[in-house]
Amino acid sequence: MNKFLMKQSIFALLLVGLVFQLPIENVYAEEEKQMVVVYENELGEKAVEASGAAIEEQYDHLSAAAIAADTAAIDKLKNDPDIKYVEPDSKIRIAENNDVQSEETAVFEQWNLGAVGAPAAWQEGLTGKGVKIAIMDSGIAAHHDLQVAGGISTVDYTTSFEDDEGHGTHVAGIIGAKHDEQGIDGIAPDADLFAVKVLDDTGEGYLSDLLEGIDWAISNDMDIINLSMGTADESDALEEAMQRAYQADILLVAASGNEGAGYPVDYPAAYDSVIAVSATDSENNIAAFSSVGEKVEFSAPGKNIISTLTGSDYGIMSGTSQATSHVSALFAILKQQFPADTNEQLRIRMQQYTKDLGEQARDHLYGYGLIQYPAPVQKEELLSNDSEGSESGDTGDGVKEEKVTTEELRILANELELTIEELADLFAAYGFNLYNYHNLYEVNDVIYQNINEVSVYFLLEKAGLDREQLDRQLAAEGLTLADFNTPEELSAYIKELEQHSENGENQAGMYEGNVEESNTTPDIPVTDDQNDEKPVNTPVVTDSAKKEKVDLGTVEQASEKKRAVSGNVQQVAEPNSETDEITFKNKSSAKSDLDDEHEKHLPDTASPIGNMIAAGVMLAAAGLLLYIRS
C-alpha cells in the first residue's frame, strides 16, 4: 500500500512538473501604451485607423491622434512612411504650491503693475477689450474678481473647466482681474478670459490633453494662448501643434522654467513659434529661480505676485508662470491698440515696449528687456497696418515718408534664410534698429558692403566661401574691397580664390579621410548650462566716417544659432520651494528605447510565466529524484 501511494505521489509530481513546462501564450494580455501619432497626410490618418489601435482623441487642426496600442501596432505605425512620428503620451504636472501665502485683507500692494506701466495704459483707455486669451492651466475658479468668457476641459474626469487646483486662477487674476475697487487689479481687465483646463485637481495631465486644448484654441479663434508650463524634454507633436497655432495668427506666450541659471529654457517656450518669458523681482533683477538662455525673449515680474485663488481668496505666488501672465496681458493691450497687426507684427512691436536692463540689445537674462508701457522710445515705434498709421517720419516739408514694411522685411529675411526676429537681433547686436529705416534700400545698405550695387555676400554665397576667408586672402595680398572697381573684377578674384580653396580641401582630404573614419565623435546636444567654445562667424561693423554699415559675412552661417536641445539627456529638476511653476515630467524617448532594449534581455524568471516555468522544473526534478530513490 505504501509503495502504491509513493508511486502515485511520484506520478502526480511528475505530471504537475510537465504541465508547468507546457508553453503558455496570451495568459496575460499585453498592456497597451498611450501614444500620440502625428501623420503626414490622409494615408497616414487611415493607417492609424487601420492599425487596430484604440483612437482616444483626434484633432480638427492638428494632423495627430492620441491612441492606446500594443507594441506590434506601435512598431507598424513607426515604420509607415505616411506617419511622421509616434511618441509617448507624456505625463505633465504642476509643481507643488509650497510657497503660496494666503491674504485675507481687501487691499493689496501690487508692485508689479507699476513695474510694467499698466496704469499708463489704463489712462489711455487700453484694457485689452475684445482680445481673447486662452489660459491653458488647471482651469479658472468662480471668483468675484474674475469673469470667465468660456472654456473647455480636456481632462478625463470632468467636463467642467472649474479650477480645483488653484494655479490657473492665480494666472487668470494677473491677466484680467476686474477693476472694481475691490481685491486686485488685472493688467488687461476687459480681455475675454477662456479657461482651458488641461491639468486635473492634483495638477497633472497628459500631452494629449494639452494638444486638445491647442486644437480648441485654434477652432475658437483665440488671439493669445498663455502657457504657464514647461518641460525639459522635446516633443515633436507639441512643436508641430505650436507651429499650427502660430500659423493661425495666435500669439503663444510660455514660461522659461523655474530651474534657475545653468538650465536651458523649457519647452514649449524654447520653440521658435513661442515667446519665452523670464521672471524679475521688485528690484528689476532676474529672479534666482528663473531659467534663462538665448531663447528668452522678454522678462516680466514673477517674484511675490499677489492674485486670485480658489474660494474667492487671494494669495502670493512666485514663478515664471506669473511672469508669463504679465506678458500675455500686455500683448492684449497692444492687440487692442493695434487690432490690424498680425501676431508676428505684435511680437516684433513688443520689442519696442521694453526697458533694456541687461547687456545692450537682446541678452540671455532679460531677452529684449522688461516689458513696459508706454514704449520707452516712442520714435522707434513700428507702424501697424492700420489705415491711420501707415505713414511716419516727417521730412520737414510736410511730406511724410513711409517706413519699411513688415512684408518687405519678411521677404528680405527669407532671402537670407533668417527669421525677422533673427535679422532684428543681428541689427541690434551692432547698435542698429531694423525698424528705423524708411525704405528697403537703407536696410540693404546697412547689411551689405556693396561694389557697384552688387552684394559681396551674394558673390561669396555663390562661391561657397565666407567673408573671413576673403578678408584673410585680401590682407595677405595687401588688398581691400576698395581696390575692385567692378563686380566682374571681384567675381573673378573670388572665383580664383574658390578654386584655390577647393584644391586645398581635396589635398587635405587625402590625408584626413582615414582619420575621420576611425575617430568619429558623436554630436553632443548643447544645453544652456554648457559652454560652447565653437567659433561662429559674426558680423563686423565697418569703421566708416561717412556711413554706418554692417557686414554680415556669410549670413547663412551667422544664422545658425546654437540651440539648447535636451536630446537624449533628461533634465528634470526637483520642484523649487520658492516657485509654483508647472513642469512637464516626461520620459525622454531615448529612455523609453533603452527600457525596451533592457526588457528584451531580461531572463524568463523576471516575469510571472518565467517563475511558473522555474517552479515546474523544480517539481519535475523533485519527482524524478523520488522515483529514482523508490
Image (cartoon, grey):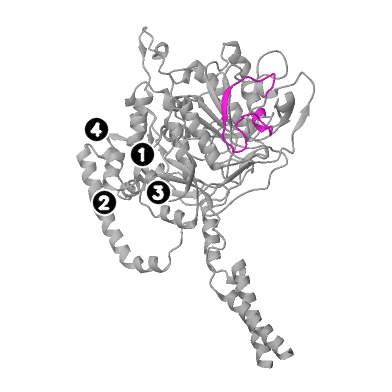
Report the residue at 55% width, 58% height from top. 29
Q: Is residue 301 left or right of residue 418?
A: right
Q: Position of residue 329 (x, y in %)?
A: 58, 23
Spatial CA distance of label 4 from label 3 is 62 Å
- Mark 4 and mark 3 in contact? Answer it, CB < 8 Å: no
Mark with earlier residue (4, 2): 4
Instruction: Kindly identify the amino acid type of the residue bearing the numbered disc 1.
Output: Glu
The reply to whether residue 378 is in sight is yes
Instruction: Kindly identify the amino acid type of the residue bearing the numbered disc 4.
Output: Asn
Which callout, 2 or 1, points to the residue nearer the camera? 1
Report the residue at 42% width, 51% height from top. 51
Mark with earlier residue (3, 2): 3
Q: Which residues are magenta?
A: 142-169
Viewer-nearest residue: 80 or 92:
80
Quarter in which the C terminus is drawn: bottom right
Which residue is under mark 1? 417
Badge 1 crowding class, 10 Å Cα cut-off, few under 14, some 14 to 19, many 20 or more, is some
Badge 4 crowding class, 10 Å Cα cut-off, few under 14, some 14 to 19, many 20 or more, is few
Q: Secondary structure at mark 2?
A: helix
Spatial CA distance of label 4 from label 2 is 22 Å
Q: Position of residue 466 (x, y in %)?
A: 34, 46
